[in-house]
Amino acid sequence: MFGVPKYSAALEQIRQERNVEGLFNHNLVAVDNERKVATFATGADGKTVEREFDLLHVVPPQVAPDFVKQSPLGASSTASSSPRLCLSRRLETSTDSSPLVRS
């Protein structure tokens, strides 16, 4: 989930404790806010999946520019560059039924 193992383990533990679904290597291609459905591409084969959501948090792919990737700084990096996503079907901290995210 995160390029630094110490933080990755802590974030993964919190994600599991809070019952948040983590979808990795999924690229967001569409959001239907009225239906609260997000559509993701799951690979090069063109397949997509839909997921309902209450709260949608998407992190785009993180890739360094070529001049950094080809430098000693880039070559020493062990961080992952795959997209990350967390979906929550339940907002435990919400005190009313109003949507927290609007289009």
Image (tube, helix red, strand yellow):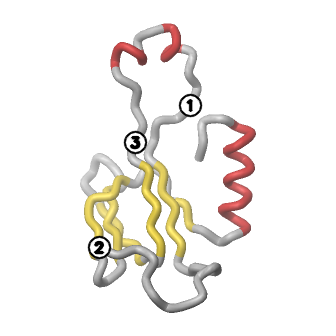
User: Which residue is at a point 57% across and 79% down the rendered structure image?
Assistant: 91
Q: Name the amino acid, label 2.
A: Ser
User: Which residue is at a point 63% across and 79% down the rendered structure image?
Assistant: 93
Looking at marks 1 and 2 on the same chain, the residue that comes earlier in the sequence is marked by: 1
The answer to whether residue 17 is left or right of residue 71 is: right
- Could you say which disc has been placed on residue 103 in the image? 2
Q: Nearer the viewer, residue 46 or 99?
A: 99
The answer to whether residue 96 is left or right of residue 35 is: right
Looking at marks 3 and 1 on the same chain, the residue that comes earlier in the sequence is marked by: 3
- Could you say which disc has been placed on residue 61 in the image? 3
Q: Name the amino acid, label 3.
A: Pro
Is the residue 4 above or below the residue 98 in the image? above
User: Which residue is at a point 44% across and 67% down the rendered structure image?
Assistant: 56
Q: Nearer the viewer, residue 92 or 38?
A: 92
- Could you say which disc has been placed on residue 79 in the image? 1
The answer to whether residue 42 is left or right of residue 19 is: left
Secondary-structure class at tag 3 = loop
Is the residue 97 above or below the residue 8 in the image? below
The answer to whether residue 38 is left or right of residue 91 is: left
Looking at marks 2 and 3 on the same chain, the residue that comes earlier in the sequence is marked by: 3
Q: Position of residue 30 (x, y in %)?
A: 26, 65
